[in-house]
Image (spheres, rainbow, N blue to C red):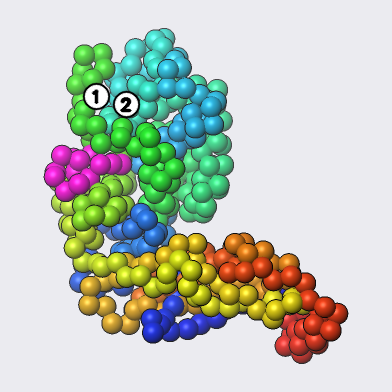
Amino acid sequence: MRAMTIAFAFGIALASSVSGLAVKAQDFNTKAPFAVLMDHETGTVLFQKDADERLEPASMAKLMTVAVVFDEIARGRLSMDEEFFISEKAWREGGTTSGGSTMFAEVNSRIRVEDLLRSVIIQSGNDAAIALAEGIGGTEETFANIMNRKAEELGLEGSHFTNATGLPDPEQYSTARDLADLGRHLIRDYPDWYHYFSESEMTWNKIRQPNRNSLVEMGIGVDGLKTGHTQAAGYGIVASTTQGGRRLIAVLHGLANERERAEEGRKLITWGTRGFELVTLYEGDEIVGWANVYGGADGSVPLVGKDKIELFMPRGARDCPTGTITYEGPLRPPVDEGAQVATLNLFCNGDAVQQTPLYAGKTVDKGDIVRQATDALKQLALGWL
């Protein structure tokens, strides 16, 4: 078995991504040192700037804290009504005297999980994040291990977490692409709880605090997700919008101040909603390509998408799309219809932009002894065995 690649061009033509999925767009730039703009539905990256470089996530790391809490609730191991204790550590490191964002929780009090979650999402409360971490993991250190397991599960290869708050730690890092993928996970897998991100304010202990994501109130369809700031890292944001009839996820980080963060975020989102068009490459039952089958009743199997294969492309793009199909092959029978066996890689203007799984379009059973012997000789001659 070895990696097989089939290159082709569209009549439409095809290609895709391994680490750098992004449509090449020379007509846009941003002051942010790190940036990503992703289409939520397809995963197409419409814009990227040093998307895979390590960055200090600041409070945007709390998105992973929220993901772990949502996962615990979804699995039935935790409820919104359960109460967690506000420890001395949570109060000292995340409370009023800490100098950071806080829920203003009272030490030794007990607070419902839902209220702690709302604080983390809306106010970026560090005390609330630590209370959630201790309530689930026993200690914040154990909770960080859970965060890293979740990151591994989601394929966030450029991220490592050491705390629930995003407070500075040289061993805690992420990338703009990972933060976009994390935001996509929260929107896609926990739709019943996504509404918390768009709440305009929260009051606790009679102290009213507005949502730290100023784009929520800007009238451009933004309904999440999280801001972050430290002195060393600068100002960052993970934002999502449904403006223009589809959902986009934007990440920017390393900006100089809140005003610049808001303006650069607005510009990136506005450009994304207006500068692209959705193109259908293949219908759901249309054959995209073929994969070789070693020793099968048929020598190859058709490859199809699960649904329509669509791609967002820059308006007026010329060299789009091109592509490759990759799979570990030749495949060995039986190959069951509907099994995921390959990946369609899409490119635009020479840049990888999207990966889409491909599935066997029919079942291929094991061939007779003559077919197996013939294929064995062929594979030996081609050096595939």
Question: In this picture, is 190 found above or below 314?
Answer: above
Give residue 14's position: percent from left, percent from top.
44, 78
Nearer to us in this view, 296 or 108:
296
- 10 falls in the magenta region: no
Give residue 116's position: percent from left, percent from top.
37, 23
Under circle 2, the secondary element is helix
Image point 55% across, 25% down: which residue?
77
Where the C terminus falls, by quadrant? bottom right
Bounds of the magenta segment: 213-225
Nearer to us in this view, 67 or 86:
67
Is 55 on the left or on the right of 330, as rendered? Answer: left
Q: Which mark is residue 119?
A: 2
- Given contact means CB atoms under 8 Å apart, are the residues at marks 1 and 2 in contact? yes
In the rendered image, the residue lying farthest to the bottom is: 381
Question: In this picture, is 234 found above or below 322?
Answer: above
Q: Earlier in the sequence, mark 1 or mark 2?
A: 2
Q: Amino acid type of disc 1?
A: Met
Nearer to us in this view, 102 or 190:
190
Pointer 1 residue: 202
Q: Is residue 279 something one can see in this rendering?
A: yes
Q: Amino acid type of disc 2?
A: Ser
Image point 55% across, 48% down: which residue?
152
Where the N terminus falls, by quadrant? bottom right
Image point 51% across, 49% down: which residue?
154
Give residue 29's position: percent from left, percent from top.
22, 65
Under circle 1, the secondary element is strand
Q: Residues within 10 Å of mark 1 (few under 14, many from 20)?
A: some
Asked which quadrant contains residue 97, the reply is top left
- 218 falls in the magenta region: yes
